[in-house]
Image (cartoon, rainbow, N blue to C red):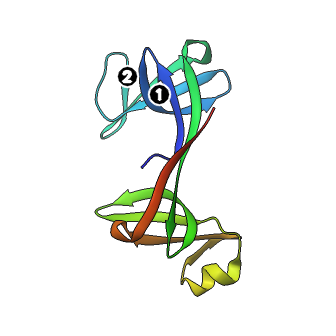
């Protein structure tokens, strides 16, 4: 499941972090020109002008008949964030109150439906 910024550079897509006029490209595998940032994480900083495309991706779904974003996954579970905007509904669903107006939970992947990516360019 994808959530966050992505860039197309030299014909390949990379998760990235835009910063002013530079883009930090990330890879899980060692690549030419990338440096180790953490175990299993490699980074290369390129000028924004070298990037062929920059976009933001969110993955939406439905869980328990309500709208959510998928913000993570782990071993058959999805971390979901409620997007319905109604606190009483979020509380009735037993969601964790993460921050003001933000409710999240771990949902079994088998209970989640209507999974779709939205790309914002």
The quadrant in which the C terminus is found is top right
Choose between 91 and 117: the one closer to the eye. Answer: 117
The residue identified by callout 2 is: 34
**Residue shown at 42%/16% (left/top)?**
11
> Could you say whether the residue bearing mark 2 is in a helix, strand or loop?
loop
Labels 2 and 1: the sequence-earlier one? 1
The mark tally for this picture is 2
Viewer-proximal residue among 76 and 65: 65
Rendering coords of residue 17 (x, y %): 55, 34
Side of 42 relative to 50 (left or right): left
Q: Secondary structure at mark 1?
A: strand
> Which quadrant of the figure has residue 100?
bottom right
Nearest the camera: 102 or 112? 112
Task: Identify which residue is drawn at 52% across, 18% down.
Answer: 46
The reply to whether discs 2 and 1 touch (Cβ–Cβ < 8 Å) is yes
Q: Alpha-carbon neighbours of circle 2 within 10 Å: few (<14), some, or many (≥20)?
A: some
Q: Which percent across, then down, holds residue 16?
A: 51, 33
Please tell me whether residue 24 is drawn above or below residue 67 in the rendered image: above
Q: Nearer the viewer, mark 2 or mark 1?
A: 1
Residue assigned mark 1? 25
Relative placement, left or right, of 109 versus 120 is left
Q: Quadrant of residue 14?
A: top left
Decide if residue 10 is on the left or right side of residue 94.
left
Q: CA distance from mark 2 to mark 1?
A: 9 Å
* Residue 22 placement (x, y as % from top left): 60, 22
**Which residue is painted at 30% across and 41% down in the image?**
39
Residue 115 is situated, as x and y percent measured from the top left of the image, at 46, 56
Q: Mark 1: give few (<14), some (14-19) or many (20+) Cα within 10 Å.
A: many
Q: Residue at x 28, y 62 (%)?
A: 75
């Amino acid at each position: 499941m994808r959530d966050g910024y992505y860039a197309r550079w030299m014909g390949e897509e990379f998760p990235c972090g835009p910063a002013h006029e530079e883009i930090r490209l990330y890879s899980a595998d060692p690549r030419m020109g990338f440096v180790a940032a953490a175990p299993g994480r490699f980074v290369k900083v390129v000028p924004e002008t070298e990037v062929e495309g920059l976009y933001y991706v969110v993955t939406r779904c439905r869980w328990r008949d309500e709208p959510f974003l998928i913000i993570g996954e782990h071993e058959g579970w999805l971390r979901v964030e409620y997007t319905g905007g109604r606190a009483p509904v979020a509380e009735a669903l037993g969601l964790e109150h993460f921050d003001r107006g933000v409710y999240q939970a771990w949902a079994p992947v088998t209970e989640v439906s209507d999974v779709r990516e939205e790309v914002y360019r």
